[in-house]
Each structure stands twice: as C-alpha cells, then as structure tokens.
C-alpha cells in the first residue's frame, strides 16, 4: 500500500483523504452527489492540542463512520446496525516532509448477536441467553492507496462478547492476537458527497483468533462462535464514510497560531468551503 500525495488528489477529495497522507488516486469518474452523506459526523473527540511544533494550519481532524454492513467471524454473521466512529488527527511534519496520522478514539455500541449465547433463533432477549458484541480498537490503523489505484485500510480489532455468564473480559481476539482487517474499496461504490467520501470496504482474507478472557466458558464460546477460523472462513463488508475539518476551523485559538505557508508552495490540508462542496 502506498501513500496518497496531497498535490495529486482531486480537490473535493483533499479534506477527507488527507488522513491517508499518500499518491494520486486513480478512481476515475467516481459518481458525485450534490447531497451530504447520509450519516452524522462528530468532531467532539478531536483534541484541542497538537504535537509540539506543529503548525495548526497544516492539521485536520478526521471523522470516519462505519454506518452499516456485515462481519462474518467464524460461524457468527453480524449486521452492523449502530454506527462505529473513529477520530484521527492528520498533519504535515516539516522534518520528514510527510503527513502523520494520530489515531484518537473509536466509539462503538453493543450489537445484539442473532441466536444469542446458544445460537438458537428467538432467544436473543431471554435472560442469560442474550449475547452482544462490541467492537474495540487495538491498533495498526492505516489508510492509503493500492498499486491498482483503489483505497485500502488496515485496522486491528477485538470484539467484546457481552453476556452475564462470560464476565467482563471476554473477547474474540486479544490485544496480542487481534482480528487484523486489511480492507479494500469496492471502487464501483465510491461516491463523493458534499461533506464526505463514501465507499464499501471489504476483506475476505483475514483469520479470526479464538476467544480470550472468557474463563471456564472459553471453550464453549469458541465452539459457539466457530473459532478460531482460518482465512477464507471470515468476511467483512463495511459501508464507510470519511469527513474532515481543518484545525483552524475547529479551534479559533489555534487559528491565531497558524502560519501562512503560501510561500512554501505546499497545499494546505484545509480547503475553502467552495472546494469542499465541489462548486
């Protein structure tokens, strides 16, 4: 996976793909929408501070929302019905001549697992039988471009299994052995919205480790989930939206500290509103 350069990106993609930091996006004539993306973006988790020496005029805060899709891990196929959001800082580092990504936070909510703890349809809301799954971030977030010109992203996750009998530390995967997604865009789904970029991201090659921290019921949890599951037995298809705002817009106090870089010839990470809306 190679990096996307800010200079080569189409104007409306610069704000949302600056977090990828990476070379020209050969997406062709991806469809454009005159509307905003069908999700809500929040910048509440954007820190009001930047690395020492950073120029606020060179930094943006990105909000990524997984609004739907499915994940099949072992024998469990889970629909995503509640948004998963991620906040990432991105900025230009003069010393290296590159952008730097700082992963800030992942927010998710528990999702009800079909079939509950025993895998029996209709038992999802029966006391002690209810099973929920919640996505947790482990590390290794990247966003960039493939040699073929598509968009790629990596992220390491673990999935918390929530059930009264499993305790509070039962996960599919662990910090040491996470679920490692290597997502590729379905380029036919890429859409430029007025405020964001949307696409479907897929991975059918990742392996799923067994459970951890489930105590005496760990063996049962693995049998119920069909884990561990080798590559080819798992899949992810995620509807993803990316949006961003310049730090000088988010925090007026930082705007006063921003330096003009017009003399350097570098493209700023934040764009005028006219470019953001594609006008």
Image (spheres, rainbow, N blue to C red):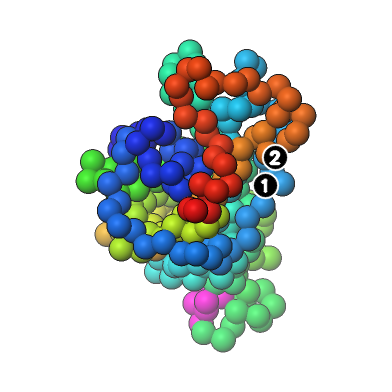
Query: Residue 56 in the image: x percent, y percent?
Result: 64, 26
Which residue, as the protein is rendered here, is positioned at the far bottom? Answer: 122
Q: Is residue 136 visible?
A: no
Specify the quadrant that holds the N terminus: top left
Q: Is 54 situated above or below 227? A: above
Q: Is 69 situated above or below 88? A: below
Query: Residue 273 in the image: x percent, y percent?
Result: 58, 47
Query: Residue 178 in the image: x percent, y percent?
Result: 46, 45
The residue positioned 61% from the left and 38% from the top of the image is 246
15 or 132, nearer to the observer: 15
Q: Which residues are magenta?
A: 114-120
Left/right of residue 190 with respect to residue 213 in the rendered view? left
- Within the magenta stretch, is there residue 116? yes
Left/right of residue 182 with respect to residue 60 in the rendered view? left
User: Which one is earlier in the sequence, the residue at label 1 or at label 2?
Assistant: 1
Q: Is 158 situated above or below 4? A: below
Mark 2 surroundings within 10 Å by alpha-carbon count, few (fewer than 14), some (14 through 19), many (20 or more): some
Q: Is residue 24 visible?
A: yes
Residue 248: give its label. none
Distance CA(mark 1)–CA(mark 2): 8 Å
32 or 148, nearer to the observer: 32
Which residue, as the protein is rendered here, is positioned at the far left? Answer: 148
The residue positioned 64% from the left and 17% from the top of the image is 52
Q: Quadrant of residue 234?
A: bottom left
Query: Residue 262 in the image: x percent, y percent?
Result: 52, 22
The residue positioned 49% from the left and 53% from the top of the image is 279
Q: Which residue is mark 2?
A: 250
Q: Which residue is mark 1?
A: 43
Residues under numbered marks 1 and 2 in contact, where contact means CB atoms less than 8 Å apart = yes
């Amino acid at each position: 996976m190679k990096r996307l350069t800010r200079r080569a990106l189409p104007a409306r993609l610069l704000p949302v793909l600056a977090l990828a930091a990476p070379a020209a996006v050969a997406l062709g004539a991806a469809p454009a929408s005159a509307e905003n993306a069908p999700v809500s973006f929040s910048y509440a988790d954007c820190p009001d501070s930047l690395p020492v020496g950073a120029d606020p005029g060179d930094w943006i805060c990105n909000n990524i929302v997984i609004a739907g899709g499915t994940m099949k891990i072992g024998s469990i196929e889970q629909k995503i019905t509640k948004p998963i959001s991620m906040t990432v800082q991105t900025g230009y580092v003069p010393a290296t001549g590159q952008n730097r990504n700082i992963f800030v936070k992942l927010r998710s909510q528990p999702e009800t697992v079909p079939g509950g703890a025993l895998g029996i349809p209709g038992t999802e809301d029966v006391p002690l039988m209810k099973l929920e799954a919640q996505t947790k971030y482990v590390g290794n977030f990247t966003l960039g471009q493939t040699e073929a010109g598509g968009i790629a992203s990596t992220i390491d996750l673990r999935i918390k299994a929530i059930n009264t009998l499993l305790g509070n530390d039962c996960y599919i995967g662990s910090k040491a052995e996470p679920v490692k997604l290597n997502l590729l865009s379905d380029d036919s789904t890429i859409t430029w919205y007025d405020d964001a970029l949307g696409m479907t991201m897929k991975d059918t090659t990742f392996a799923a480790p067994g459970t951890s921290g489930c105590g005496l019921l760990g063996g049962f949890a693995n049998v119920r989930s069909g884990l561990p599951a080798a590559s080819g037995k798992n899949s992810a298809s995620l509807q993803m939206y990316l949006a961003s705002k310049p730090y000088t817009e988010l925090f007026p106090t930082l705007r006063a500290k921003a330096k003009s870089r017009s003399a350097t010839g570098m493209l700023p990470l934040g764009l005028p509103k006219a470019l953001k809306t594609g006008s």
